Image (cartoon, rainbow, N blue to C red):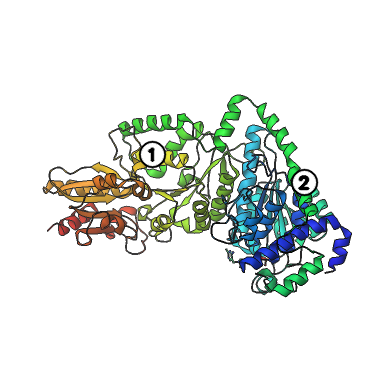
Amino acid sequence: MDLKALAAANPDHWAKATAIRALTLDAVAAANSGHSGMPMGMADVATVLFEKHLKFDPTQPNWPDRDRFILSAGHGSMLLYALLHLTGYADMTLDEIKNFRQWGSRTAGHPEYGHASGIETTTGPLGQGIANSVGFAMAEEIQRAHYGKKVVDHYTYVVAGDGCLMEGVSQEAITLAGRHQLSKLIVLWDNNDITIDGPVSLSDKTDQIGRFKSAGWSVLEVDGHDPVAIDAALTKAKKGNKPTMVACKTHIALGHAAQDTSKGHGALTDADQLIAAKEGYGWKTGPFEVPADVKNAWEAIGARGVETRRAWEERFDTLPRSKRETFNRAYALETPNKLSAVIKAFKKQMSEAAPKLATRASSEKVLEVVNPVLPETVGGSADLTGSNNTKTADLGVFDVDSRGGRYVYWGIREHGMAAAMNGMALHGGLRPYGGTFMCFTDYARPAMRLAALMKIPTVFVMTHDSIGLGEDGPTHQPVEHLAISRATPNTHVFRPADTIETAEAWELALSAKETPSVLSLTRQGLKTVRTEHKTKNLTALGAYVLADADGRRQAILLATGSEVEIALAARDILQEQGIGTRVVSMPCWELFEDQDESYRKRVLPGGPVRVAVEAGIRFGWDRWLFGERGRREKSGFVGMHDFGASAPGGTLYKEFGITAEAVAEKAKSLIK
Ligand SMILES: Cc1ncc(C[n+]2csc(CCOP(=O)(O)OP(=O)(O)O)c2C)c(N)n1
């Protein structure tokens, strides 16, 4: 590349873009780790985007109508950190840049949501950002329909690399965006032909332009180092009626000895090469020093949005009060008082009616009363609407000509759905929930993990939660998925036993601010076990005594979900034989763990034998069986030890020995 010619053609632009490159080189060198090449290659595109197009105000980083900038290629985190620092985000100080990747800094190895303002989502696992962005763009459409263009009118810009486009989840995201004509979604592809192992051609020959076009996108192609062309492409992209992919032809590690090589992808720390690169740029200041005129020019870009934001505030103030209140409440993730009232009324009615219902059907009943009072919910399913029971009559369907619809037919795209739901939650103003079979938690898991890491309250509705689903067989019968979900930090896994617990679980999931929820729901009908109405949300305790021992307490049976009624039947057997037996329902382990010791001790006192029953693997149960004052030799587990099988659900419970008789026998064998 002829850097001198580039610099001479657009000197002001060149100086600003070089500031990004120089800060990247310095930060990576100081950390002795990181990824230099991508920020150096995309510096020109990012500079034009921030200077000429992006609507943002560093003094109000969470302004709801800002454009969203998503760095899907999260390894290039220094691109984002440099932009935030240069444009004047108060929390992205030069010290943060100097402490790139160090303990306690905001500048984590990959951008982490919540660490600094201006980081819209956590990226690093390739493909997640572009999949999040579909949810961001849908959220914008939905909210524009609800609140009007004068208060919701912004774009979602994504920087994605070859890696993001190779990941399978990007296909789910791209086809969704194309189908829904998300015209305010603009992907900037860092088309540099390089990945870690070498040239892209080592492992891929996809015609990316044809791929995007066939999915319903507009595609533009530009020289990613020509600011005039980039500006023109962005201007055009904003006008289309389809999502736009701008293929930006770039040179990874522009101007460095490692330019255009896979070495340029990683940490460029060689001191001599670093000096040579800066000389080539005509950059004369020392490490981490941005000349005052260049910093001023960047800060002027940062200040550009202040007026626009103020004007927006004025327009927002003209909305009717009730709209403003709903908007602000939803963005603050507050729930209306009505939520608790409708849940209580529903619980009272259901504990009296005591229906036999699958908890997936209970869940639908709950949603029928909840969705009308929570206009921020957006439901959906990955092509299992009738099985997941996620759709209620009032939602309407999100589509090109009905942007206000609150139900999304996600298609067979579990991973894309989960990641896009995260995008909706991150966008703000919406509470997404979406369903699939519990077994396909595996297909959604990378995004479920990120929801937990990001501390966002996405709700994953996972039905058909055990061998109880029956004839579909072991491919569809989850056995290890409860354990996997429970092993994930900051995740509430609810496995309700009946309609009442399902209502309580939903109340908690929809009130959460920083924790995603997994609702593990049955296909098969369950008896109502909570027939005595209690206004208090007992599921919030995580575990509670559902039926206490008559007489001397010799056994405690612990169960969740569909196995609670088995535990109750086992209790009947044991009580008949004079063995005082308590049944503890444990709809949410994590919430029980949060209770203070005295409560946990009241529920699980030492002494009696303990038997846990759950139609999943044992993994994790030992915490409750012989932690918490229990004893190994006085405890047992009735559940799954292997994969399930294809047969009616009732047969499977018998064949795998998950029965009241087996639970009672196990308890008796432990009582000596
Ligand atoms: C899901 C996932 N797999 C693997 C990685 C490790 N990784 C980080 S960057 C990268 C190569 C990405 O290539 P590209 O997007 O072309 O980035 P560039 O080389 O242009 O910086 C890989 C494999 C990752 N971050 N996420």
- Up the image or down, 112 lies above or below 535; here it is below
Q: Where is the C terminus found, in terms of image quarters?
A: bottom left
Residue 229 visible here? yes
User: Residue 573: where, in percent of width, then height?
Assistant: 16, 48
Q: Residues within 10 Å of mark 2 (few under 14, many from 20)?
A: some
Looking at the image, in which quadrant does ligand 1 appear?
bottom right
Residue of label 1: 504
Query: Which mark is nearer the camera, 2 or 1?
Result: 2
Using the rendered view, name the quadrant where residue 5 is placed.
bottom right
**Labelled disc at residue 300:** 2
User: Residue 321: where, in percent of width, then height?
Assistant: 60, 25
Q: Is residue 190 left or right of residue 4?
A: left
Q: Is mark 2 within 8 Å of ligand 1?
A: no
Residue at horizontal 70 percent and vertical 30 percent from the top: 315
Residue at horizontal 33 percent and vertical 55 percent from the top: 615
Q: Secondary structure at mark 1?
A: helix
- Number of numbered markers: 2
Q: Is residue 291 left or right of residue 376?
A: right
Amino acid identity at mark 2? Ala
- Up the image or down, 310 lies above or below 209; here it is above
Q: Is residue 369 left or right of residue 534?
A: right
Query: Which residue occupies the foreground of this view, 527 or 636?
Result: 636
